[in-house]
Image (cartoon, rainbow, N blue to C red):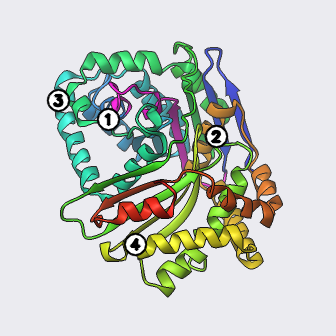
């Protein structure tokens, strides 16, 4: 497939930069990605990447928090950030002629955060509110429990990105500064832009802003072992039971990733998929239900998620189990397989048109493989997957230990039912 021209360069200190030309756009998306997140945190430091991301906007060596926001907004730009398990990222989007200024603004956040002590105390209260939202949300709780069921708490993959309340209360300004000094090094940074990018100006701006950043070493983590099991949390006041169940799948770029993606789409992507047709349309067991194969740098998960009433949770679990068994035992429906394949192909092509998706994928490729992968190769892999290979995914699940999580209004005997259905006894 044809793709936008891409410029890739590496500075002498090891920092990588990527420019993806999308000349039909009127604005440029620019991000700085740092290979550090909850995967890189000890239990004692769980949540510190998230706090650092928040606090970076509270002041730098030359700007206070009001100036940080004003500098971007006076150019009409939107500036934001996020923290994930495998990375932290700072984003800005605005006009092409302002790219050099955008690079300097984000570099200031990454290289010169001052973490004012008074701002840290205020931001603790803000993040406490974020904790409250997460703790009140059965969906968030179910996914956090699911990760814990998958990997336990001995590996950081089982830890929540937001961290722990006790850690948030304990972190000091010195903790944040030490973490940034250790983790924010050029070997762990990708600066990426997509849009009508003036490549020479972009490269010059990155060299000027980041050229003196210490090189450091890659922040590497060993992959976790899959554990499986069941975790649950009953939440007062919740009217629904949130369910997440799944199995191990290939990590990003590993053999079989396309096969698992196709198996997940076959089972539960789109209103005509067996999962939605059976559980929602025919039996009315859930408003929301779906299946996905998520590939991360170190791990992968093929999971089913659903929200249902406590009274219907047992029947929903039984229906999911029957669908998994049916796909393992009966011939794969050729119409359904091609429907799923076309959905994934279109999704891939649409992602190629979205600048934020392109630059995040580029950063993940560089962190994981040290190169940019061709989306055309992924499409070729999808087109080559056979029905037998897809069925083999479902057959393998019967020999693997499932991970299951319940949150919200969880019926008393649902745990025993899940353990019996999915071999967790």
The answer to whether 216 appears left or right of 154 in the picture is right
- From which residue to which does the magenta span run? 23-49
Q: Disc 2 or 1, which lies upstream in sequence?
A: 1
Q: CA distance from mark 3 to mark 4?
A: 45 Å
Q: What residue is pinned by disc 2? A: 362
| Residue hosting label 1 | 54
Residue under the point 62% across and 63% down: 264
Marks 1, 4: nearer the viewer: 4
Can residue 372 be seen? Answer: yes
How far apart in space, not on screen, are marks 2 and 1 (Cα)?
A: 24 Å
Distance between the Cα atoms at labels 2 and 4? 42 Å
Expressed as whole percent of the image width and height from the top left, the position of residue 188 reads: 55, 24
Task: Give how far across and how far down residue 118 sits, in percent.
Answer: 16, 25
Of the numbered discs 2 and 4, the one sitting upstream in the chain is 4
Q: What number is the disc on residue 314?
A: 4
Callout 4 secondary element: helix
Q: Which residue reaches farthest front?
A: 425
Q: Which tag, 2 or 3, sits closer to the chain's start?
A: 3
Residue depth check, mark 3 versus mark 4: number of the one nearer the observer: 4
- Residue nearer the viewer, 299 or 38: 299
Quadrant of the frame with the N terminus: bottom right
Q: Earlier in the sequence, mark 1 or mark 4?
A: 1
Please tell me which of labels 3 and 4 falls first in the chain.
Answer: 3
Q: What is the x, y in percent for residue 121? A: 17, 29
Front of the two marks 2 and 4: 4
Q: Nearer the viewer, residue 160 or 378?
A: 160
């Amino acid at each position: 497939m044809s793709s936008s021209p891409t410029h890739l360069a590496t500075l002498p200190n090891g920092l990588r930069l990527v420019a993806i030309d999308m000349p039909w756009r009127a604005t440029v998306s620019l991000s700085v990605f740092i290979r550090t997140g909850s995967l890189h945190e000890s239990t004692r430091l769980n949540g510190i990447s998230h706090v650092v991301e928040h606090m970076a906007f509270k002041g730098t060596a030359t700007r206070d928090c009001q100036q940080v926001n004003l500098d971007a907004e006076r150019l009409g730009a939107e500036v934001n950030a996020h923290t994930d398990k495998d990375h932290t990222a700072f984003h800005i989007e605005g006009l092409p002629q302002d790219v050099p200024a955008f690079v300097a603004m984000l570099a200031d956040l990454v290289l010169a955060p001052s973490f004012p002590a008074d701002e840290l105390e205020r931001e603790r209260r803000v993040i406490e509110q974020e904790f409250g939202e997460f703790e009140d949300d059965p969906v968030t709780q179910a996914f956090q429990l699911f990760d814990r069921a998958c990997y336990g708490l001995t590996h950081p993959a089982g830890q929540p990105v937001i961290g722990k309340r006790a850690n948030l209360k304990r972190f000091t300004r010195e903790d944040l500064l030490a973490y940034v000094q250790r983790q924010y090094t050029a070997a762990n940074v990708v600066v990426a832009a997509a849009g009508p990018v003036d490549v020479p100006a972009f490269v010059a701006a990155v060299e000027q802003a980041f050229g003196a950043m210490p090189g450091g070493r890659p922040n590497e983590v060993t992959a976790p072992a899959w554990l499986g099991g069941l975790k649950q949390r009953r939440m007062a006041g919740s009217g629904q039971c949130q369910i997440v169940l799944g199995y191990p799948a290939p990590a990003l770029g590993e053999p079989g990733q396309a096969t698992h993606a196709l198996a997940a789409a076959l089972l539960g992507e789109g209103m005509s998929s067996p999962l939605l047709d059976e559980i929602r349309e025919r039996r009315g067991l859930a408003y929301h239900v779906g299946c996905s194969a998520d590939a991360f740098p170190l791990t992968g998960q093929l999971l089913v998620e659903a929200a249902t009433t406590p009274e219907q949770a047992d029947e929903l679990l039984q229906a999911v189990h029957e669908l998994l068994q049916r796909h393992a035992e009966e011939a794969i429906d050729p119409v359904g397989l091609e429907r799923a394949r076309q959905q994934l192909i279109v999704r891939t092509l649409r992602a190629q048109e979205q600048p934020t998706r392109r630059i995040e994928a580029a950063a993940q490729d560089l962190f994981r493989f040290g190169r940019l992968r061709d989306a055309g190769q992924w499409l070729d892999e999808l087109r080559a997957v056979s029905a037998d290979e897809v069925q083999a995914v479902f057959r393998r699940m019967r020999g693997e230990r499932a991970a299951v999580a319940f949150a919200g209004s969880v019926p008393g005997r649902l745990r025993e039912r899940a353990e019996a259905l999915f071999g967790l006894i």
